[in-house]
Amino acid sequence: MGVMFAILGGVLAAAMGGVGSAIGVGRVGRAAAGVVTEDPSKFGKVLILQILPGTQGLYGFLIAFLLMNNLKLGSAEALNLTNGQGLQYFAACMPMAIGGLVSALMQASAAVAGVGIVAKRPEESGKAIIFAAMVETYAVLALLISILAMMNITSTIA
């Protein structure tokens, strides 16, 4: 049962980060499409803003991958976890799961506003990118705390 708790944590980290990123990239894409319709030369600037909320999905995938690697799933050396250890892995994945979802959505909001900046003042696109990139800090912190928490869980080999 412990392994199932751990796997659920990894699945949630990947799924919630992926869902947040998909919604975020979609929102920014809609705003960017309107700008590009009016001025196709702004495509590169709005594309950068659209890409930013997609990183949380990658971070969630990374946590799930590291978890599966730590548990040595699919190998003869697969770990046998107690319920407590499984819950520790589950908890270790939650910063990325929750932080990934929320930061992707918030970053999308900042990026949509940045698309508005690019539409009116394309020379200020760097500032628009910085506004959206500031939210990335919290996704990176969630990633780091999940990694550090996973590194400090002791397990036994089955």
Image (cartoon, grey):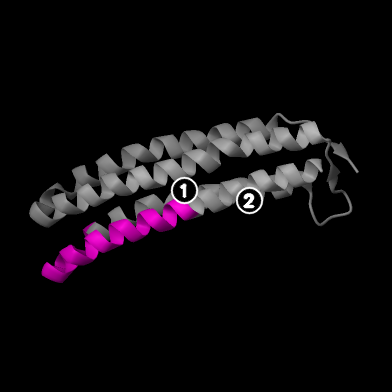
Q: Which residue is drawn at 15% across and 67% down?
A: 41
Position of residue 63 measured from the top left corner of the image (x, y, whole percent): 60, 45
Q: Nearer the viewer, residue 114 or 26?
A: 26
What kind of residue is marked 2?
Val
Position of residue 131 measured from the top left corner of the image (x, y, whole percent): 26, 40
Residue 143 in the image: above or below residue 54: above
**Between discs 1 and 2, the one toward the N terminus:** 2
- The circle on residue 11 is 2
Residue 100 in the image: above or below residue 57: above
Q: Which of 73 and 87 is in front in this view?
A: 87
- The circle on residue 115 is none
Q: Which residue is drawn at 72% across and 43% down?
A: 6
Q: Which of marks 1 and 2 is in front?
A: 2
Task: Give the overall secondary structure of the magenta segment.
Answer: helix
Please identify the quarter of the rendering in which residue 27 is found. Answer: bottom left
**Secondary structure under the numbered disc 1 in the rendered image:** helix
Residue 97 in the image: above or below residue 25: above
Q: Residue at x 18, y 67 (%)?
A: 36
Position of residue 8 measured from the top left corner of the image (x, y, whole percent): 68, 47
Position of residue 154 measured from the top left corner of the image (x, y, whole percent): 79, 31
Q: How far apart are marks 1 and 2 (CA)?
A: 14 Å
What kind of residue is marked 1?
Gln
- The circle on residue 56 is 1
